[in-house]
Image (cartoon, rainbow, N blue to C red):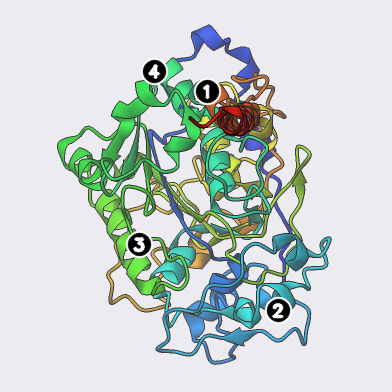
């Protein structure tokens, strides 16, 4: 049920990034967006959360739901594959097996989930559990071609979202290797005077995933608490870029990771969004909400290769902003580095690295140029509550929208001529944590053991040769 796509490259190509030298970049922005807020939840595929959006696969879904733009959902999936809806009143599932993603993928056949990740992989939620998230998809913009950056679990994907790079790792791992902090988005933002903050529940508890960056110490002032984020909204000190994370800092149960109750995480997420909406920053903010990876849940769309990297399974992306198109479905191919790409684009910075340069830009999800009736470009916030139901009343009649409700762009920073901030990504493994050091220690221990045995034998021999008086 895909609609004809609208190419929007020309609208943004006028912003020629190559025309500004690195030394001439200032913190001014290309778009009216002055603040970006990024939230990354955990472990749900697109089909698992939006498999039945927007009509619940019924003919009596009501006039609002029936009028909404339809993404590529499970109604487009192959028939007879054994999908089942999670019953109303059930808000969690068991955790699918996550360490078998290549077998789930099956070289793009997408037919290995049930036999590898388990029968729970073939289930999906609906608006009865996630009314707020479905309402955001209705009122703002959602992407149906957004993929995890890596066909793997949490750690590498979160690193891609902060560095466009995971050190060559494709499984969850404890460092080393480390990624040099000066190759991260934090270093780039610092270099060009763009303020930022990374917010977790309690920074004193732990700093995951910043512990994967070597040399993160000089950037530690940016690691702050959720309370600091809320305070910045109230006090007028919100940085240009904020990451507000439900993982790290000792947080538990907020990230929707199975087998957690998904409504608990949605309630936390709603609190973040509503506080931004009700702050002085709403008119200049874009909120990007996504999930780190699919969690082993089924998705029917084969993931693409980006800049030589096999991406992971499709996951949701919402963009909530006064400039976001209403009820828009983006078909732009994107991944976790697309948020970095937007940050670089918006502040007129070099692409963080070659991977970020080749990642799709989410520009088609915004309307910066075509006013609504009355001449305004800025939409008022649609503030939802925990008790909100789906569907909600549309803010603007669909017939009055000055744009189509689906489309895509081929625009990337590379296509716009952007330079690179990091031309060659590297990793760091301290010698004391290296394989070579471990091997040297093992050899030394063997040598010590060997000498100890020799000395013991010699002592025994000398003792046996000594006359008894």
* Residue 184 position within the rendered picture, expressed as x and y whole percent measured from the top left: 51, 28
The foreground one among 91 and 142 is 91
104 to the left or right of 325? right
Q: Give the mark toward the camera: 1 or 2.
A: 2
Q: Which numbered disc, 3 or 1, marks the residue that appears first in the sequence?
A: 3
As helix, strand or loop, the secondary structure at mark 2 comes to helix
Asked if one can make out residue 70 in the rendered structure from this viewpoint, the answer is no
Residue at point 49%, 64% (across, down): 137
Mark with earlier residue (4, 2): 2
Instruction: Determine which residue is flagged by label 2.
Output: 114
Local packing at callout 4 (Cα closer than 10 Å; few below 14, some 14-19, many 20+) is some
Mark pair 4, 1: CA separation: 12 Å
CB under 8 Å between discs 3 and 2:
no
Residue beneath the point at 43% across and 64% down: 136
Label located before the other in sequence (3 or 2): 2
Q: Residues within 10 Å of mark 2 (few under 14, many from 20)?
A: many
The residue where tag 1 is placed is 348
Instruction: Give the image location of residue 320, x and y in percent.
Output: 42, 53
**What label sits on residue 193 in the rendered view?**
4
Q: Give the CA separation, mark 4 to mark 3.
A: 32 Å
Q: Nearer the viewer, mark 4 or mark 1?
A: 4
Q: Residue at x 55, y 33 (%)?
A: 163
Q: Earlier in the sequence, mark 1 or mark 2?
A: 2
Disc 4 to disc 2: CB gap under 8 Å: no
């Amino acid at each position: 049920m895909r609609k004809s796509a609208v190419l929007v490259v020309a609208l943004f190509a006028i912003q020629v990034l190559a025309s500004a030298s690195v030394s001439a970049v200032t913190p001014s922005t290309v778009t009216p967006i002055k603040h970006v807020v990024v939230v990354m939840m955990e472990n749900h595929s697109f089909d698992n959360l939006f498999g039945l959006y927007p009509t619940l696969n019924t003919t009596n879904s009501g006039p609002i739901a029936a009028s909404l733009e339809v993404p590529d959902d499970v109604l487009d999936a192959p028939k007879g594959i054994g999908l089942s809806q999670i019953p109303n009143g059930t808000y969690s599932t068991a955790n699918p097996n996550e360490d078998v993603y290549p077998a789930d993928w099956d070289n793009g056949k997408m037919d290995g989930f049930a036999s590898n990740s388990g029968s729970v992989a073939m289930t999906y939620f609906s608006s009865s559990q996630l009314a707020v998230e479905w309402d955001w998809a209705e009122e703002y913009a959602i992407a149906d071609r957004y993929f995890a950056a890596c066909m793997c679990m949490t750690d590498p994907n979160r690193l891609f979202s902060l560095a466009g790079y995971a050190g060559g790792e494709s499984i969850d791992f404890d460092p080393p290797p480390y990624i040099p902090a000066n190759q991260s988005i934090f270093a780039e933002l610092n270099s060009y005077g763009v303020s930022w903050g990374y917010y977790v529940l309690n920074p004193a508890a732990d700093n995951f995933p910043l512990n994967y960056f070597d040399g993160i110490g000089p950037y530690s002032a940016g690691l702050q608490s959720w309370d600091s984020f809320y305070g910045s909204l109230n006090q007028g000190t919100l940085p240009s870029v904020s990451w507000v994370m439900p993982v790290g800092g000792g947080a538990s149960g907020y990230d929707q990771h199975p087998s957690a109750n998904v409504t608990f995480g949605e309630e936390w997420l709603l609190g973040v969004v509503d506080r931004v909406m009700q702050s002085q920053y709403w008119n200049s903010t874009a909120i990007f909400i996504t999930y780190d990876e699919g969690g082993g849940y089924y998705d029917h769309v084969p993931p693409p290769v980006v800049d030589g990297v096999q991406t992971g399974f499709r996951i949701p992306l919402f963009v909530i902003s006064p400039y976001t198109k209403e009820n828009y479905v983006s078909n732009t191919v994107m991944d976790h580095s697309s948020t970095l790409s937007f940050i670089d684009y918006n502040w007129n910075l070099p692409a963080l690295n070659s991977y970020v340069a080749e990642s799709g830009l989410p520009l088609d999800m915004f309307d910066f140029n075509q006013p609504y009736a009355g001449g305004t470009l800025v939409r008022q916030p649609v503030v939802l509550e925990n008790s909100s139901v789906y569907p909600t009343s549309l803010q603007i009649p669909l017939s009055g929208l000055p744009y189509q409700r689906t489309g895509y762009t081929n625009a990337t920073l590379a296509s716009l001529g952007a330079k690179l901030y990091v031309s060659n990504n590297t990793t760091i493994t301290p010698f004391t944590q290296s394989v070579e050091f471990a091997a040297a220690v093992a050899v030394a221990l063997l040598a010590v053991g060997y000498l100890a045995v020799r000395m013991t034998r010699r002592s025994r021999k000398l003792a046996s040769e000594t006359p008894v008086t």
